[in-house]
Amino acid sequence: MEEKAKKAPKKSWFDGLKSEFRKIVWPDRTEIAKQTVAVVVVSVILGVIITLIDFAVQYGVDFLVK
């Protein structure tokens, strides 16, 4: 089994990198725009949810302390 590994031609790291780069399918402009809008919308929604939870917890702590 070790003999097979020794006989295999060695490819340089850059050859592997080039072959992997050829496999990449880059998204078009409209797909990037859709994904950007989705990320912004989800970020805003999560920001609002976290803010509401923060206010609720702060109100609860203030209520218990007073």
Image: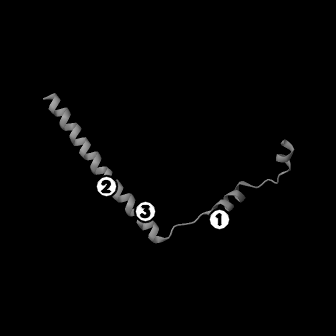
* Residue at the limit of the structure toward the bottom, as seen here: 29
Q: Name the spot of residue 65 as percent of width and height, x first.
A: 16, 28
Q: Position of residue 28 (x, y in %)?
A: 50, 70
Q: Does residue 18 appear to the left or right of 37 in the view shown?
A: right
Q: Is residue 47 above or below residue 35?
A: above
Marking on residue 22: 1
Residue picked out by circle 2: 44
Q: Given the current orientation, which residue lies at the most extreme front position?
A: 1
* Mark 1 burial class by Cα count in 10 Å: few <14, some 14-19, many 20+: few
Q: Measured along the vertical axis of the image, is residue 53 above or below residue 35?
A: above
Q: Using the image as rendered, state which of residue 25 and residue 21 is in the foreground.
A: 25
Q: Which residue is mark 3?
A: 35
Report the amino acid beneath label 1.
Answer: Arg
At x 84%, y 42%, the residue is: 2
The residue depicted at 26 percent of the width and 46 percent of the height is 51
Q: Which label's residue is closer to the chain start, 3 or 1?
A: 1
Amino acid type, label 3 = Gln
Point 26% across, 42% down: residue? 53
Query: What colour-coding does the image apply?
Result: one colour
Where residue 62 sits in the image (x, y, percent)? 17, 33
SS at mark 3? Answer: helix
The amino acid type, in three-letter code, at marker 2 is Val
Q: Quadrant of residue 63?
A: top left
Q: What whole-number distance in Å separates the C-alpha atoms at marks 1 and 2?
A: 36 Å
- Crowding at label 2, few (<14), some or many (≥20) Cα neighbours within 10 Å? few
N-terminal-most mark, 1 or 2:
1
Q: Quadrant of the N terminus?
A: top right
Instruction: Give the left or right position of residue 23, taking residue 53 as reference.
Output: right
Q: Judging from the image, what secondary structure is the residue with disc 2 in?
A: helix
